Image: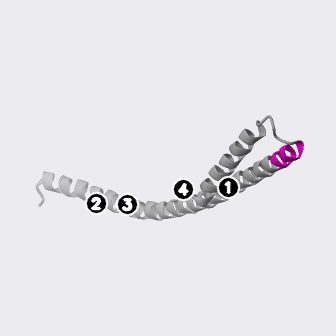
Amino acid sequence: MTTTEQTLEDIAAAKQAIDQASQDPEITVALQAILDHTANALQKLEDEIVLSTEVALVVALGEKNQELTTLCTEIGRLTKEMDHITDIVRKVGDTLGAVVTVLAAVVSTGVV
């Protein structure tokens, strides 16, 4: 469990304890006011933790997305380089195919 998760769990436990204490029929008005104020402060803290966690997640995901975009760009660049090599090899294959055709014609005429 992360520190953030533990803190959120502790806040939930504190809020539950405050809720239970608030239901005591003999609670004084002053104590109820303090409990209400504490519950509000805990809720604000919880909201801030969740928001900061969400913001951190968005930042982290944005960084990962940028990394993936960079890798895709690099793959595209390397693929284009490979396309050039493929074109050269294809030309060699075409030339070799033409040579084979000519040699086959020569062999079939019995010259060789």
Q: Is residue 33 magenta?
A: yes
| Place of residue 7 in the rendered image (x, y in percent of width and height, measured from the top left) | 65, 56
Q: Is residue 22 above or below residue 53?
A: above
Tell me whether the residue at label 3 lies in contact with that at label 2, contact meaning CB atoms closer than 8 angstroms. Answer: no
Residue type, numbered disc 4: Met
Assign the magenta stretch its main secondary structure: helix
Residue holding disc 2: 96
Residue type, numbered disc 3: Lys
Secondary structure under tag 2 reads helix
- Label 3 crowd bin: few (<14), some (14–19), many (20+), radius 10 Å: few
Please provide the residue range marked out in magenta: 29-37
Residue holding disc 4: 1
| Place of residue 19 in the rendered image (x, y in percent of width and height, measured from the top left) | 74, 40
Which image quadrant for residue 87?
bottom left
Q: Which mark is residue 53?
A: 1
Pointer 4 or 1: first along the chain: 4
Pointer 4 or 3: first along the chain: 4
In space, the residues marked 3 and 1 are separated at their CA atoms by 56 Å
Residue holding disc 3: 91
Residue type, numbered disc 1: Thr
In space, the residues marked 4 and 3 are separated at their CA atoms by 60 Å
- Foreground mark, 4 or 1, reads 4
